[in-house]
Amino acid sequence: MRFVVSSQFFLLISFVLQHLHICLTFVENNRLFYAKEFLNRFGYIKTNGSSLDISSSTVRAFQRFVGLNQTGIIDELTWQKMREPRCGNKDLRRIQRRKRYILQGSRWPSNEPLTFRIVKYPTTFPQQFVDAELTKALKLWSSASSLEFDHRKLKKQDEQKSNNLDHKTDIRISFEIGDHGDTEPFDGPGNVLGHAFFPQYGGDAHFDNDEYWTMK
């Protein structure tokens, strides 16, 4: 038996392969674009135009920070790490003079309790549940450090004094959506869960109210 393959069949195969190549290129470019935006947002690089090129040393810096093998390649494990829910603060800042990466930040004074207040609650839970869970979380922090925390609750009769109380509170916690006035807009469900300002430079802690928060 002889099989006759028509020219139309070859054209069909060529079209499918070409279309597949275009789709794979599109997916790869999207991944590179996201990776570049991610590395820029979290302090590893500064964007330089529309180029999708990312140096292997930059990828290795991220891999080192998250505990992966430092291959310098955005492999599947590295990609998954970039897609995980995380804090919105930058991981590192570049010290050009010393040519190395260091952690950034400042410290709270440890000689007196730190005050905290929840100034804006999530829309999905009663306030008393949120109070209890955040107090529990800060107790874990306190048990592993020299810090102590004092919850300042705003009573109804003190609502007009809210601004004055804010100025005297070390940590102000709020649940926000999207662009909320601090140049670091939230991205909706997934990826960035929250961010905070360093001690003595504001003290605010913001959580993304678009996330699906649970009490578990």
Image (tube, grey):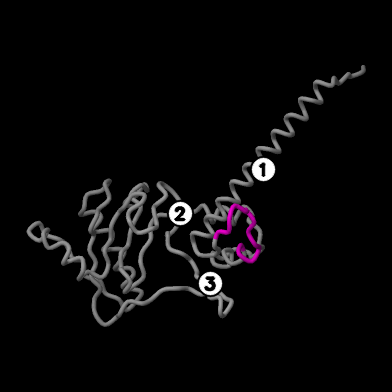
Is the magenta region chiefly helix, strand or loop? loop
Q: Tell me which corner region of the image, top left, top right, bottom left or bottom right, holds residue 153.
A: bottom left
Looking at the image, which residue is at 24% across and 55% down? 120
Q: CA distance from mark 2 to mark 1?
A: 26 Å
Dot 1 amino acid type: Thr
Residue situated furthest bottom in the rendering? 111
- Residue denoted by label 3: 94
What range of the chain is rendered magenta?
47-59
* Magenta stretch holds residue 216: no
- The residue under label 2 is 85
Q: Which residue is found at the position 27% from the left and 67% from the top? A: 171
Please tell me the numbered disc located at residue 25: 1
Q: Which sits earlier in the primary sequence, circle 2 or circle 1?
A: 1
Q: Earlier in the sequence, mark 1 or mark 3?
A: 1
Answer few, some or many: residues within 10 Å of disc 2's Cα (few below 14, many 20 plus, some between 14 and 19).
Answer: some
Instruction: Tell me how far mark 2 sits from mark 3, CA to CA.
Output: 24 Å
Residue contact at pointers 2 and 3, CB within 8 angstroms: no
Q: Quadrant of the N terminus?
A: top right
